[in-house]
Image (spheres, rainbow, N blue to C red):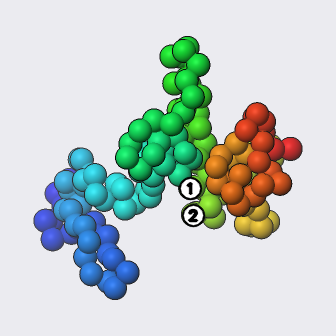
Amino acid sequence: MFIPPNIKVIVEGEGGEVKYSQGLSDYLRKPSIDLQMATYGNTLLDVLIEESYSSERLVLKQVLTGNAHADATRLIGSIAESLVVNLCNLHSEVNRVLGMYARFGQRPHKKLDDYVAVATGSMRAKNHFPQHYNPCAALLR
């Protein structure tokens, strides 16, 4: 399918100025990293720093157990949970769908807009939702 070169994917800044731009044809084949970061939000480094896994000087602060498989699994799980929570809090439609599955529902419902996604073991929960902070819990019930 031919896509004219003047059709583009554009990310604008707060003032409406073009921050990033890429032809739609190129974007569909290989989206630029700048557009992906603008589209999907937090980078891995943002998550690692926010969750206190890394300092801003990129020094790993996590206590490792000596079991590389367990450490990697724990770190990847924490990062994934943080990214999912970010998506839920930024996009109500994502929150509705994932909330529906979490509640074993059959359809998304606007009532779920009244709920905030919280990663119970995250630093964000510890700082902003201390009543729900529980780094040992798999689920908040």
Q: Which residue is mark 1?
A: 87
The picture places residue 54, in percent across and down from the top left corner, at: 47, 42
Dot 1 lies on which element? helix
Dot 2 lies on which element? helix
Residue 139 falls in image quadrant: top right
Residue 134 falls in image quadrant: top right
Q: Nearer the viewer, residue 47 or 20?
A: 47
Residue 6 falls in image quadrant: bottom left
The picture places residue 133, in percent across and down from the top left corner, at: 77, 48
Q: Is residue 124 left or right of residue 4?
A: right
* Picture disc at residue 90: 2
Picture residue at 57% right of the left edge, 28% below the top: 63
Q: Is residue 136 left or right of residue 77?
A: right
Is label 2 in contact with label 1 (beta carbons under 8 Å)?
yes
State the separation of the CA atoms marked 2 and 1. Answer: 5 Å
The answer to whether residue 28 shows anywhere in this view is no
